[in-house]
Structures are given as C-alpha cells and as structure tokens.
Amino acid sequence: MSTVTLLAAAQGNTVMLPAASHTQQAGGAKSYSSFEPHTASPLCYDVYCAAMDNLENCRRIRRKRGPYIQYQFRDSGVPVPKSTLNELDHPERKRARPANPPKPAVPRKKVKVLQDSQGTNKQTSDFVTSTSSDVDPTNYLETPSGAAQSDPALSIDNGTVPACGDFIDCDTDVPCADFVVDDDGDDDNDESERFQYMDEEELFNQISDETSDDHSGNQFDDDGSQDESEDDECAAAPDLPSSVRDRVKLLLLLATKKRHNLTYTAAESVMKLSGLLNKDGDGFSPSKYLMKEAIDAYSSEMTEHYVCPNCGFYIGPIKYNVNSCANCQLQIDYNECKKGKSYFIYLSIKQQIKALLESGLSSHLIAPQHRSKVCAGNYEDVFDGKLYKRHLPEGALSFNIFVDGLQVASTSKHSAWPVLLTLNELPLHLRRKFVLMASVWLGKTKPDINQYMKPFVEECLEVYNTGIDYMENGVTKNVKIACLMCVSDSVARPLLRNSKQFNGRYGCGLCCHRGFRMRFGRGKITSYSLRNGEFPMRTHEETMELAREADRTGTFQMGIRGTSILSSIPTFDIIHCLDLDIFHCLVNVAKRFTNLWVGKKGINEPYNVRTRLAVIDRRLLSITTIDDISRAPRSLTERSDFRGHEWFHWVVFYSLPVMMNILPPRFLNHWALLVHAVVLLMQNSVAKSEVTYASRYLKLFNEQIDLLYGPAHVTFSVHLLTHLENSTVNFAQPWTHSAFIYESFLGEIKASVKSGTGVAQQITKYMQLRIALQKMRADLEFAMSDEEKEYLSSMMSSSKTLANPHLVIGPAALLGEPQRMTLSEEYRHALVRADVAFDQSNEYPSYDRCIVNNELFQSSKYKRVKRQVNCVVLLESNKVFRIKSFIVISNVCYAMGHFFKDRRHVKVSDRALPHYRVLGENETMLRCIPTTQFSMKLISFTVKLSDEENLTLGCVNVLKMEMLS
C-alpha cells in the first residue's frame, strides 16, 4: 500500500511528524535514527519512518529547504506535507549508474547543515581540493561558501567596535591533506555574519561582473541549444578558395562577424543576402563551414588536455595515448572524461605570438633602451621596474599573465578559468587590443593549478630557452620570451602560489603578517592591524624552503601549502611576480568605506552620514564629466550596480568634494590620505620620492583605521595597500600591470558564448578568430582596395571613430561644418591682445569641435552632449582656460575663451592634492590662445556646498592611462 493510500486511510487525522533526535555526525550531517511520536496516525508515521530509513530518500529529503524540514523538529506543530509523502513514494528518476563506480580517493564535495534564527536548516556546499590520496573522510574542514568571492573584505556584524583585547591567536598548523580552497573553519569568517553589516546590495559582487563592459548576461541552461562550435560537419567543407579576391571577401566577412558578434549562421545569411542584392557579381558566397576552415588554417592549433576524473592528475592530450592515471591507476576513457568536464583546452602561446609578430606588430615593439622619457629617473612603464631590469636579457620580450574565474552565464553554475596574456613591449593601446589566451578550463569547481598550468609552464620553458622563430621583411629572426609576472585577484592568487587564503593564518602572500582572529558582533573576522608593528617581507628563497618542508611534512608552513608549479618558470619570483592588483584592491576598499558612511548598519556611528544621503546623491547627479569617462556619476543608492571604473572615479575624483561638509573632518582628512597616495602612483611619470611619500600616506591610512573605525575594518584589501610601494618599485606604476585590461576582455569572452553546450570550445573559437583575422589581414592586405581596408579597420576596431575632420591644421583637426562669422568688437580686442593679424572686413570660419593631441575639445556653446563638459583645458602656462569657440585665421587655429580666476586658498581637505584645481569665476576679458598651447583636458564640475557657497573644480584625469592600458 502506498503512502498516499495510507494517508487517505487515516480518515482525516492530521499527520504530524515525530521530532527527530538529532545526533551530530562527521561532516556536519545529522542522524534521524530515533523519533518520538506525536499524536498522529501511527500508520502514516510508520510508513514515513520506513521510508526515511531508506538512505537515498533520506538524502533527497534532507536536501529540501523551507517547509519540507520544519516538521522534523520537536513540538513544531507543522503537519506532514502531502507533497513530501508523494516524494517518498515517487522518487526522482535518475540516470543509471555503473554497478561499481570508481570511488574517488579525495572527497570532492561536502555538505554543512546550518541553522538560522527561525530554526530552519540550510545547506552550504564547499568544494575541497587536495593532492593527497589518503584523506580521512571524517576529518573534513569547513569553509563558508561566501569565501569564494573575489573581495577579501571580511564578515562583520553591526555593533560597537571591539576592543583590542578581543584579538584571538592560534598557533596550530593545519595538515595539508585537509586543505580547502578557502582555508580551514577556524581561519574563515562566519558565513552567517557575512552580510550583516551591509546594505540591501551585496558588498562582494564578482569583480568581473562589475568591471566588464555592458554586455548582457548570457541566459541559457546547461542543456542549451546546439553548439555551433562543433566541427563534425567541417570535414566535408570545401578547401579554402585559391583566389586572392575570394579570400579578401572571406576576411571582410569574418571581421564583420567578430565586430558584431554574429553566429556563423548569421554571417552565412549576410553573404546570401549580399548575393541576392548583387546578382551580377561573381557569386562567391562563403558558407559557415568555409569560415571555420579559414579560421583553423590561419590560427594556432587547439588541443584538448585531459585530467584524471578520479584524482585530478594531469594526463595530457589524446596523442599521448595514456591508458591509465599515473597517480591512482584508474583506467582512462577519454569520452567519459569529456562528458564529465575532466579536460581543458590549450592554445599554443608560441604560435600565437609568432602570428602577432608576423602580422606586422614587430615594427611596433618598444625598445626599452631607446624610448623617449619625460624624466630619466622616473617610473614611466614596466621597463623601469627593478624585476624587469634584473631578469630580462637584452633583446628579449616579456609577457604578463592573468588567471581568474568567469561565470559565463547567470543560469549556469559552470565557470570558466581562462589564462590570458599580453606582451609588455607593445604600446599601451596595442596591449589592450591584442590580448591572447593560453588555455581555458570550464567546470563547477576551481581547477587544480599545479595540474592545469602544466602545458603552459612547459611552453614557457621552451620559448625562454630556444625562443621563437618568425619572419620579418623576408628575414628569419629569433627572439626569446619570458613570463614577467602574473596578475590575479585575492582569491586566485593563493591558488597560484599554493598557499592559504587571505582570511587564514599567514594569509598574506607578500609578508609574514599572521592576521589576528577577533570577535566582531556574533562572528569572527581576520584583522590585519599594524598596531603591533610591521612584519617582515617574504622572499622567494625562504618561500621555496617552506614549500619543500610543507611537501615533506604535510602541514602548512607559515601559510605555504606546498610547491607551486609557477616556480618552475625561469626568472619567476613566486612572491613578487605574483603581485597585487590595484584594481581589485581599490574597488574593495571603496565599497567597504562607502557602505560604512551611508549604509543602514551602524547608523549611530560618528562616521555614518546616511541621513545626508539625499544631499550626497544630488551633488553626484549634478557632476559633469568628459568624453574619456564612459559613465556619468550615479546615485550612491545604486552603488550595488557600480562597475569597477565607477568606483575608481568615485575614489579619485568625486568622493572628497562630494563628502565635504557632510563627512566629519577627521574622517574626510583620513580618506584624503588614500586619494593622495593613489593619485601620486597613477601619474604618467612618477618620481622615486613620490613613491616614498605615497607609501607613507598608505601606511598612515592603514594605522588610523584602528582609531577611527576599529581594527575590524583593517581588512586584507586595506592591508594590500601597504605593499603598493614594492609593487611600484618592481613593476613601475600600478596601471602598467593592472587587471583592468583583462577584466574588460572577460566581457568580450562572455559575450562570445552563444550556447550552453561546448562553452570552452566557443571561447577558444573566438580567440582563434581574433588570431586568424590578424594573420589574414597581413597576408591579403596587398590585394585590398582602399575602401576595403577602411571597412576592415572599422570592423576590427572596437572604439568609436569620429567623423572625418573638415580641416586639419598642424596638430588640430577641426570637426563639423564651420560657421562664417564677422569678427565682433570683443573678438577683435582679443586678437589684438594676442598679436594676431586679421582683416576686419573678412569673414572667418568658426568651429565648435576640435581634436588636439588625440583629445576631443568642444566649445561651451556645443549642446549636443549631456552631462559632459569638454571645454576646460589646462595650458602649458599652468593656467586653466574655458573654450568659447575655435577660429581659423591665416591658417592657424585659435581658441577663443576666458581664463578662470584662481582660488588656491581653498582646499578640498587638509592637504593639497596635486590633481585638483579649485577654480573661481571666469574672467570677463575674452582671450585668444593658439591650440598648440593646450596641455590636457580637465574634468570640470561644480558642487553646491551650501546655499551661499559653490565649489568648482578642475581635475587632471590621472586614471587615463589605467583605462587605456
């Protein structure tokens, strides 16, 4: 008799489940072995208990949330839902499994059952990684799922700032065999307290989602539609056309496909439509199979590398013909490995770099010894860094790599882990344009870096020792290439270094700071306070000794778990070459302190000004920007949607003037320390003395957090700021090795995914398309007309192109149709004061837009753009000028306008910040300035401080290099 039938036989008696006598077992699971019956139908109760004795049903029911588990507690008074009894009678159908499936040596997943304030159980799943095949399944370590977030800010709760006496210290080392990605339970933050201090938004969003361009999230299930990356049908595709003209058409079509992110089917339809509209042509219409054939012919080879599905050990590509795992002896079935996502795709970096050099980029390479500099002793690019000079031989090239996770779709739990790289010797604008990808991993778990990076490390050794042969102007050349450094966030960096996470003991990979566990609210956090003094820096040699000791003993050694495979790369310092990234670091700090100021929690704290949030928003929304800044400021109530560069702009440009007379002075002056340090380090040319000053400001900013906000807010991101000095000395300014370029490129990768199946193949095909376009362009450019070259350039450039200039005079390019004007008396007096000869009877052309030194300037009369002011310019004389119009006299371009009155006595904070110019009203006298005297465009805006006082600022765009690099 079924459970439902027994329920009907109870004649309407309400069935109440007995309270379970819970006993805690290993791994956090609870036993439901004994029950105390309530007053209910004993028949239904017996049926339920019998069903619960079935292990599979027990596991299935225990995964339920909400009302499905409330009746299991004593005296809950909740009746058994009918759907639950139906669930027991009609279990979910599952795929048949093998009779004796191989038992994994290392547990992949564990479940931790928590209890919230309503008494409802909830589950969090954490993924465990280990290199040991001898693990006791009863000795799992537990870590909050939230620790996988990229922001290293810590779990906090509302309440008063704890005293110093609340610090907790622990001297127990953790065995390496029980290592988890986010560290052990004692070293992690309490997940239940994770968002207690935050507002309605999550403070720790994935940085890749915030910083990528405005690509809409891919919405597809794991089942997805048919994958267009499958090339089974390509075997029947025709060969590439032998006609050069046909190949040129194919090149233009592929460039259009990439520019507009078309599918192969859409590109094929475009060609069919073109053929219908031009029936008198030659009839050449490439199919999607021919397009794929062209990409394969002109790009680097794609290979699939497999790992053992049991222990994760690296096996290699199919051509290695490996039948069993060398680590656990499991028989390898490559088809099963592919179905189970136990593989990754690799693209040869040697072939990709060779293709770039042969496409004409070799002529753009920068020779560090022969480049022009603003100041000989200053830091101006990565070539001025200490490690670049120490490790790279003369004539060699170098590249930086980036490793991070990317959620490819909002409806899928799979994440991609690409390995991206850029050549340092390319100019800044080309580094961003030519991002290469070495490999991509797709799965629900993080990859084992020591296995995933094996083919990459092997190829790094090859290109460093033997170099790359490439053709330039018919001559074969050889160049050696070295991996200079790796950029990643605070979650991926410990995986690459094979060390503890940031919230564990000795979690900082750059110094020996232990991190203090302290109570805060109802949970615990890790504080990196410096109140007990500074800590010594780590070195490569000491870390390698600790790694060997950790491998031998199986225990962590000062936070080091074991040897990292990256240490096998020549000249790669496992400490300093795995450097911090100012992009993630500054964004995390900005989020935390902004939430402290205007968040809902801590409303009674002296630094909380949430009651003035409406005034702050009005000031922000009144700010005007320039065309170099893609987004105008938004309200702080929308800060959960801020992109990474919006947080940058908030910190450097807007935060201080907007918070004037709102945030108490001691907190505003403290924040000015951070702004001043960042501005000094982000300049185009940074003196060594400025690096020293910036380091002092950052340490002072760190130390004063203890006094102003409490040690709980000295988070890992705040601590990383103290290491920016060494980062600048080793690799020059932070923008030379920032993650901004890679995070923006992740947006392109995400947009290239069209289906939920074969995601890794789609990403790889997109990268192959980028390489093929460059190679085809270099191969076929001789046969292209000027019109075709112009079209191809527009398709291969992602930036917006301005209209063709109407007139070019020296460095000035004037845009738009001019207005012929007779000089007024005011204009004539301005020209006389500037000693410009003119004829009063003539009419002269007047323009509203002009490009000078690759910067767009607009007159104050130009009203076609909203919330942009591109008419304020800093002159070489260090004066600030407001442009009224552009005029051409005797083949010379002049800017007519007014100087600003200087208000140097007014300060935004207690310190003079070098990128701010406090401006007064315009002078009444009209001036005439040659455009050759333009130095740079300023960000100009006015903040209303009170009914009687306004603050007008002109800001130097110190982040321009960061956004362009």
Image: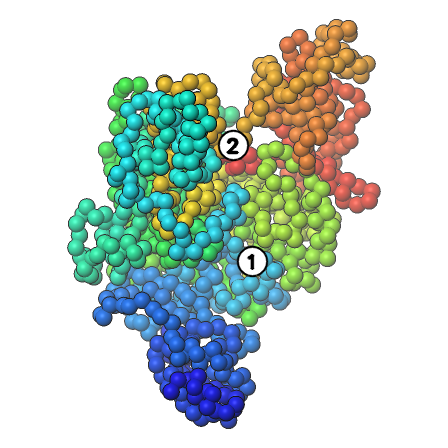
* Cβ atoms at labels 2 and 1 below 8 Å apart: no
Q: Is residue 264 left or right of residue 656?
A: left
Residue type at tag 1: Glu
155 or 766, which is in the foreground?
Answer: 766
Q: Quadrant of the N terminus?
A: bottom left
Image quarter of residue 476: top left
**Residue at screen point 54% across, 51% down:** 588
408 over 79 or under it: above or below: above
SS at mark 2? Answer: loop
Count residues near mark 1 (Cα–Cα under 10 Å), then give few for <14, some for 14-19, many for 20+. Answer: some
Identified at 59% across, 19% down, the residue is: 805
Which residue carries the number 2 mark? 799
User: Is 479 positioned to the left or the right of 575 in the image?
Assistant: left
Where's residue 17, x and y in %? 48, 86
The numbered dot on residue 202 is 1
Percent position (x, y) of residue 845?
69, 14
Residue at 47% of width from left, 88% of height from top?
A: 8
**In the displayed structure image, the side of residue 316 where residue 738 appears, left or right:** right
Q: Is residue 320 left or right of residue 908?
A: left
Question: Which one is in front, 118 or 801?
Answer: 801
Q: Quadrant of residue 900?
A: top right
Looking at the picture, how far across and down is residue 468, in whole percent? 27, 31
Q: Where is residue 297 drawn, in percent x and y? A: 29, 33
Q: Is residue 533 something one can see in this rendering?
A: no
Alpha carbons under labels 2 and 1: distance apart: 32 Å
Q: How many marks?
A: 2
